[in-house]
Image (cartoon, helix red, strand yellow):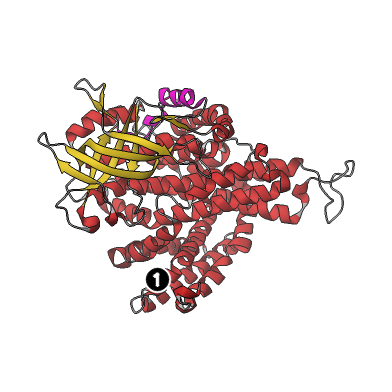
Amino acid sequence: MAVYKAPLKDIQFVLNEVLDVSQLAKLPGYEDATPDTIHAIIEEAAKLCENVLFPLNRTGDEEGCTYENGVVRTPKGFKHAYDMFREGGWTAVTCDPEYGGQGLPATVGFALQEMFTASNQAFAMYPGLSHGAYEALSRHGSDDLKKKYLPKLTDGTWSGTMCLTEPQCGTDLGLIRTKAELQADGSYAITGTKIFISAGEHDLTENILHLVLARLPDAPGGTKGISLFLVPKFIPKADGSVGERNGIRCGAIEHKMGIKANATCVMNLDGAKGWLVGELNRGMPAMFVMMNAARLGVGMQGLGIAETSYQSAVAYARDRLQGRSLTGPKNANGPADSIIVHPDVRRMLMIQKSFTEAARALSLWVGLLIDEAHSHPDKDKRDAADDLIQMLTPIIKAHFTDMGSECANLAVQTYGGHGYIRENGVEQLVRDARITQLYEGTNGIQALDLVGRKLPMKGGAAAQRLLGEIAGFVAKHKADDKMKEFVEPLEKALGRVQDAALYLMQNAMKNPDEAGAAASDLLRLMALTAMAFMWNRIVVAAHKGLAAGNDNAFYEAKLTTARFYVTRVLPQTVSLNHQIKAGAATVMALPAEAF
């Protein structure tokens, strides 16, 4: 069976020893976010994940959502779990106290996201999307909209969605046809069809707030003519309670490969009443607030799946008896050794372990950067943090989900034929993981975003900020004998990133296909290097732990896993650099009709 226990010790290690989360309490507005407070919150979340959400993961997958006459019902137990989630204040953790939130840092939210998605990805999507709607509305909504809707999103009695995709367009939102017409009362009548709307209809909350992209009849073409509208399922009354049903309804739910307990809906709008969010024809910047939050959230889904896959694979490898160790029996009194003795099983487990631990550190660092960008009193510090966030968002979304899918497949491989059987639980992880590489922008789109938008951003200054952060670490630690075996591979990988970037600068202007052909390889090259950077930071913390003489086995395991990463995973950067510099010629040479 699949297993999951919140990795509290590792989360606390990253927060306190790798990142020094105590600095959060020095930021304005976060004075109460002490390490002790954060620890208590994460411990309580772990209980909810282990005792309530994870037990519903498989049953939710087996039952799925049901649709009948426009009504969607979530699987048995989901409504009760959501009520517990809401009543426990988990929807309000990082929301503004002005709207009833707890005002805690984003760093805390990232730690919680990992645990929620690891224990039950389909469930976690319901409140996760609501928080994305909260973020977009809080930044771009009018004071009236914020006052009316944000308290309900904060306390979780109402939920939210993002409605972008249409049958004829996904990534290319300039092709949307949903129309908005101004009404005499200042609202808009919205008509059109949206597809693939996660949590578009369900029975968990009393109202659902849809953020809908639409176009006015006289709007400019393409993305420059798109506006964003808030379209509630029920139009609120003056006292804030739900009123009449609006003209937006679920026409069907999709029958999917995975995340079956999350309703993926076709939403039909027939003159639905909506209110403008932000400025006319400026819907994309407002929606990208939600989109960027969602991309990081999906990256956390990749990490969560990888963690559950790893834990399940380890548990099985310890128990499953099969064959004998190549170096002699390790279970001499038994009929066979457990498969964890076999090098190839160890290889699969170490790939997962070396990913999850560095990914956790990278994601929590980004949470810390978000808090700095939001609250640091020094504008230069805020700008620097934002540059790093912009660079790391496509890396986290794409690499974490690619690896989440790989780790899920490695878990099945570890189980062997038993992994292919549904009741053992790990085949669900493969199915659930696959969507993460597709929604909120496919990973190919993330790579194009990195190469086409993020690398040239601010004349390359944002990219230099990230590379400079790594280079500064290398310069600081390269003379340390204890760090040499880790820092030298990082320095070489950084050189390959710089070499590949220089190649693109020299060639992509002449032939844009060069950037397109290199994009996915460059993203992975940068991701592997960023993960090596985090492993180096983990190693620094581990050496300090060993010097203090506390829990030596824990810290030695960190060093051993770091060695695996820099010797068995990071060398992929060599081939990726060669692939990038091979150019676009062989990628584009074959005529379309020859495929």
Q: Position of residue 326 (x, y in %)?
A: 83, 56
Residue at (84% x, 56% y) in the render: 327
Question: Which residue bears the numbered disc 1?
Answer: 515
Judged left or right of residue 551, residue 77 is left
Quick one: quadrant of the N terminus? top right
> As displayed, is residue 408 above or below residue 95?
below
Q: Main secondary structure of the magenta part?
A: helix
Of residue 400 and residue 273, the one placed in the foreground of this image is: 273
| Visible residue check, residue 25 | no
Amino acid type, label 1:
Ala
Of residue 488 and residue 575, the one placed in the foreground of this image is: 575
Magenta stretch: residue 19 in it? no
Which region is colored magenta? 77-96
Residue at (68% x, 42% y) in the render: 421
Q: Position of residue 356 (x, y in %)?
A: 56, 48
| Visible residue check, residue 558 | yes
Q: Position of residue 187 (x, y in %)?
A: 16, 36
> As displayed, is residue 274 above or below residue 175?
above
How packed mark 1 is, by other alpha carbons closer than 10 Å (few <14, some 14-19, many 20 or more), is many
